[in-house]
């Protein structure tokens, strides 16, 4: 047992839990749609009936305000579970692909079937929704699941363990509490799918471990998500919306705006707009005891962020201070160069560098020269600018005139590209992650007269028939 937390699972317990969940998978109990539906409704109840407990847990671990907890953790989870329960039958319906007429009596069908027992490894920054939304998809798909939440949010992880045992089928959905040794052990086992959310550093370890068993993986990683301000942008609106994205969970959000690229011609107007938005968001000192803002998750992260504020060569124009409760005032830094320490790693905290560039083309070049981010935000209504951003950059998502709230459009796939990860989920996409599209055919004996030419011995006649597709006419253009 790990010394630091008596609720951590021992290695023997992990083996026992794995065997139990594997047995559940074999029994087929998680497959029927009415079972899946019941579990999904239970998951929604688990949140709704214990709203205050969840809010308190997130408050204890992250100091996150109840409003942020309701809007970004609890609401999306309940909505996601109910949406899956409502659409389950549709998503799980077998499909009849369009086939050539001569194959129509082969009964070609695609069955969406559960992949098998899945592993979810989730991060600390949104410890409820980033654990439970993947779980919703896995339940909907019919997979049993082992869940490993983050050790950095121990109150939420303990609550997840207790609630999931109480509300869901405990033989099919189990939380393992632990840190690196427990995750390492879990990664040695064979899973049907692993969905990992977190840093690229650990993502690489997960992908390497999965490769040993040829296990498919979804990697939801991070990266520096840029903002481009175009000359035609409404600067007050842009400033408010950029700052909104930055204050959510004190910037500890995978799609938080990481840095702003602004053409020199409008840079001073944009800075003024940012300071105006700042004053309206923070009518009192952001570090006041009644603070509404999340704390930084641990001392090491706090220290890392404060060091960045100290070592930047830019000018701190707002914030710049922290306190003993690990809160850092949202900090705006102007005149930041592309070689500044703030422009190296993903910031993942409440610091917003503003980088001046010659024009929108230069901004696009900066984005295109770096790793593809999880999100790219552009403030513009100019169709030429929009098209250039679409054509010349790549990112998990491309959002015009807002930040962060693309995540409420559940119908769109959420995921990264390149260093920001691979695979995507949300809504039916999550169901698809845990689903195998199994091909099915039934070839009746009456086919023999029509397919007899496939059997040896091969003859000139059978060869001619088999060349039919090779000789298909090709259109000129
Ligand atoms: N794409 C997304 O949806 C998304 C969402 C949230 C966070 N993120 C990204 O996650 C990162 C921050 O999250 P984090 O710090 O919790 O990530 P992390 O990678 O440190 O931890 C995530 C999980 O990995 C486990 N882990 C940590 N070290 C390990 C090791 N050596 N071996 C095996 N397992 C290990 C942890 O126990 C935890 O459960 C940021 O980069 C952020 O952008 C991405």
Image (spheres, helix red, strand yellow):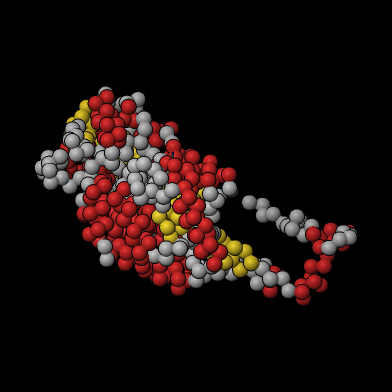
Q: Is residue 463 above or below residue 85?
A: above
Residue toward you, 423 or 128? 128
Is residue 322 visible in the rendered image? The answer is yes
Residue toward you, 387 or 126? 126
Residue drawn at 43 percent across, 32 percent down: 369
Total marks drawn?
0
Residue drawn at 48 percent across, 50 percent down: 12
Residue drawn at 29 percent across, 31 percent down: 304
**Where residue 90 sits in the image (x, y, percent)?**
47, 70
Please tell me in which quarter of the rendered image ligand 1 is found: top left
Is residue 193 visible in the rendered image? The answer is no
Residue toward you, 157 or 210? 157
Residue farthest bottom in this picture: 446
Write down the quadrant of residue 273 in the picture: top left
Residue farthest left in this picture: 284
Q: Is residue 295 left or right of residue 383?
A: left
Residue drawn at 22 percent across, 34 percent down: 332
Write down the quadrant of residue 238 in the picture: top left
Q: Quadrant of the N terminus?
A: top left
Write down the quadrant of residue 372 in the picture: top left
**Where residue 170 sits in the image (x, y, percent)?**
42, 63
Q: Is residue 193 left or right of residue 45?
A: right
**Where residue 296 sits in the image (x, y, percent)?**
26, 40
Residue toward you, 403 or 143? 143
**Where residue 73 sits in the image (x, y, percent)?**
30, 55
């Amino acid at each position: 047992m790990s010394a630091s937390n008596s609720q951590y699972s021992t290695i023997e317990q992990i083996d026992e839990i794995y065997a139990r969940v594997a047995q559940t998978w074999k029994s087929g109990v998680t497959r029927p749609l009415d079972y899946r539906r019941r579990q999904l409704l239970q998951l929604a109840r688990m949140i709704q009936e214990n709203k205050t407990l969840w809010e308190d847990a997130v408050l204890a671990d992250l100091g996150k305000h109840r409003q942020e907890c309701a809007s970004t953790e609890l609401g999306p989870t309940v909505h996601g579970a109910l949406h899956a329960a409502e659409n389950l039958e549709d998503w799980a319906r077998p499909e009849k692909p369009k086939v050539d007429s001569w194959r129509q009596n082969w009964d070609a069908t695609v069955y969406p079937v559960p992949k098998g027992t899945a592993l979810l490894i989730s991060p600390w920054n949104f410890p409820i929704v980033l654990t439970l939304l993947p779980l919703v998809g896995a339940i909907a798909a019919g997979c049993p699941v082992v869940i490993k939440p983050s050790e950095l949010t121990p109150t939420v992880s303990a609550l997840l363990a207790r609630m999931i045992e109480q509300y869901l089928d405990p033989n099919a959905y189990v939380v393992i509490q632990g840190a690196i040794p427990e995750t390492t052990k879990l990664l040695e086992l064979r899973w049907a799918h692993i969905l990992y959310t977190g840093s690229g550093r650990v993502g690489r370890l997960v992908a390497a471990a999965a490769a040993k068993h040829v296990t498919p993986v979804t990697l939801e990683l991070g990266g520096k998500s840029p903002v481009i301000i175009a000359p035609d942008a409404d600067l007050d609106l842009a400033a408010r919306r950029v700052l909104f994205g930055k204050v959510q969970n004190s910037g500890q959000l995978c799609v938080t705006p990481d840095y702003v690229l602004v053409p020199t011609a409008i840079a001073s107007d944009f800075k003024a707009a940012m300071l105006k938005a700042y004053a309206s968001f923070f009518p009192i000192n952001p570090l006041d005891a009644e603070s509404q803002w999340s704390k930084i998750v641990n001392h090491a992260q706090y220290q890392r962020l404060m060091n960045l504020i100290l070592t930047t060569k830019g000018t701190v124009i707002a914030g710049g201070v922290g306190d003993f409760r690990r809160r850092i005032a949202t900090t705006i830094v102007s005149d930041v160069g592309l070689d500044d320490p703030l422009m190296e790693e993903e910031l993942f905290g409440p610091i917003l560098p503003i980088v001046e560039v010659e024009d929108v083309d230069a901004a696009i070049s900066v984005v295109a020269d770096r790793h593809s981010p999880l999100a790219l935000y552009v403030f513009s209504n100019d169709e030429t600018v929009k098209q250039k951003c679409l054509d010349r950059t790549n990112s998990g998502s491309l959002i015009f005139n807002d930040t962060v709230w693309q995540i409420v459009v559940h119908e769109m796939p959420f995921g990264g590209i390149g260093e920001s990860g691979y695979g995507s989920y949300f809504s039916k996409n999550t169901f698809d992650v845990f689903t195998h599209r199994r091909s099915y055919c039934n070839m009746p004996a009456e086919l023999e007269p029509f397919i007899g030419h496939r059997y040896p011995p091969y003859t000139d006649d059978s060869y001619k028939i088999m060349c039919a597709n090779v000789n298909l006419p090709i259109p000129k253009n």
